[in-house]
Amino acid sequence: MTRARIDYVWIATFAVLVTFAVPWFLWGDSRVFAGLPLWLWWHIGWMGLTAVVFHLFTRRAWDRGIVDGVR
């Protein structure tokens, strides 16, 4: 993939992570699993996924917009 395409993939990835960070679709849902509300489990899992994606970003694409002198 070209550098620009990789940039767009990272932008889209982070947009999806931000969009689904708050489980709007689980608001008002009273289901419970292991003593905690389902929406809280979603949030815990989503933050774990976000941490993994951010780790990948720091290892593979941290230099985006910095190395080339783009400000």
Image: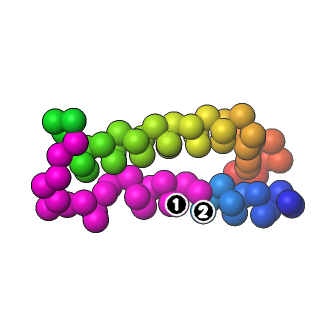
- Does the CB distance between marks 2 and 1 fall below 8 Å? yes
- Residue drawn at point x = 46 percent, y = 37 percent: 48
Disc number placed over residue 60 in the picture, else none: none
Any magenta on residue 21?
yes
Q: Of residues 43 and 14, which is closer to you in this image?
A: 43
Mark 1, residue position: 15
**Separation of residues labelled 2 and 1 (CA atoms):** 5 Å
In the visual, does 43 lie left or right of 13?
Answer: left
Instruction: Give the x, y percent position of residue 11.
Output: 62, 59
Instruction: Give the x, y percent position of residue 3.
Output: 83, 57
Figure quadrant of residue 56: top right
Instruction: Looking at this view, name the residue that lies furthest to the right.
Output: 2
- Secondary structure under badge 2? helix
Instruction: Give the x, y percent position of residue 21.
Output: 38, 53
Q: Of residues 33 and 7, which is closer to you in this image?
A: 33
Figure quadrant of residue 60: top right
**Quadrant of the snapshot with the N terminus:** bottom right
In the visual, does 24 lie left or right of 12?
Answer: left
Instruction: Give the x, y percent position of residue 53.
Output: 59, 43
Instruction: Name the amino acid, label 1.
Output: Ala
Mark 2, residue position: 12
- Residue drawn at point x = 80 percent, y = 42 percent: 67
- Residue drawn at point x = 25 percent, y = 50 percent: 39
Callout 2 environment at 10 Å: few (<14), some (14 to 19), or many (20+)?
A: few
Any magenta on residue 15?
yes
Instruction: Looking at this view, name the residue that lies furthest to the front.
Output: 34
In the visual, does 27 lie left or right of 67?
Answer: left
The residues colored magenta run: 13-33
- Secondary structure under badge 1? helix
